Image (tube, rainbow, N blue to C red):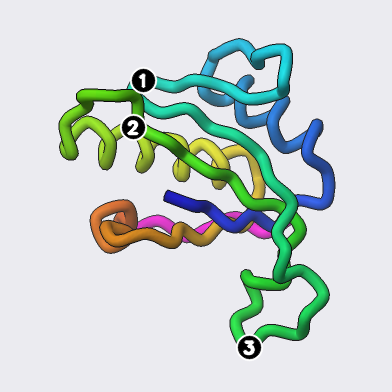
Amino acid sequence: MQIYVAAPSRDRLMERLAAVLNVSLGPDRSLSYGCVEVEWEHNDYEGTGADAEFLDWHSLLVCQPHRDTSATAVVSDTATVLEAVREAGYRAVPVCDYEDLLQKPDTEPRRT
C-alpha cells in the first residue's frame, strides 16, 4: 500500500508521523505501527506534470504488512497510519486495492 503525501521533507514527515502514532523511528527513519512497516520513498512522479495533483507530491509512504497478518488488521492499521498523516497536518492520498476501506466519509485532509 502506498500513501502519497504533500510533504517536502522526509525527516519532518516521519518525525511528525511517529509523534502522532506514539512510536519510535528506526535508525533508517522507518517506523513500525501495529502490523505494518512504514518507509518513506521519494515519489518518482514528482515534477512530471501528472494529471492527478497527488502524483506531483514529493513524498511517498510505503506500508508493508508483517508476515501472516490478517487482511482486517492490515486495513485497520493502515487506516490509522493514513489518519495520523492527516492529523499531522499533511494532505494524503492512499493508493491500493482497498483504498475505499481506508476513507472515512467525514474525514477531510488538512491542508499544509
Residue 47 placement, left or right of 95: right
Magenta stretch encompasses residue 35: no
Which element carries disc 2, helix, strand or loop? Answer: helix
Residue under the point 18% across and 39% down: 71
Residue 80 placement, left or right of 109: left
Instruction: Assign the C terminus to one quadrant of the image.
Output: bottom right
Q: Quadrant of residue 34?
A: top left
Residue that label 1 marks: 34
Q: Crowding near pointer 2: few (<14 within 10 Å), some, many (20+)?
A: some
Q: Quadrant of residue 24?
A: top right
Q: Amino acid at mark 3?
A: Asp
Rendering coords of residue 16 (x, y %): 69, 29
Which element carries disc 1, helix, strand or loop? Answer: loop
Whether label 2 touches label 1, CB < 8 Å: yes
Magenta stretch encompasses residue 109: yes
Q: Earlier in the sequence, mark 2 or mark 1?
A: 1
Q: From the viewer's perspective, is residue 60 above or below residue 76? A: below
Question: Marks 2 and 1, Cα distance to the nearest angstrom?
Answer: 6 Å
Residue under the point 43% across and 36% down: 64
Which element carries disc 3, helix, strand or loop? Answer: loop
Residue that label 2 marks: 77
Q: Which circle marks residue 25 in the picture? A: none
Q: From the viewer's perspective, is residue 40 above or below residue 97? A: above
Q: Amino acid at mark 2?
A: Asp
Identify the residue at the far front of this view. Answer: 67
Residue under the point 51% across and 61% down: 93
Whether label 3 touches label 2, CB < 8 Å: no
Residue that label 3 marks: 51
Q: Quadrant of residue 45?
A: bottom right
State the extent of the magenta-drawn residues as a range: 105-112
Question: Marks 1 and 3, Cα distance to the nearest angstrom?
Answer: 34 Å
Q: Amino acid at mark 1?
A: Gly
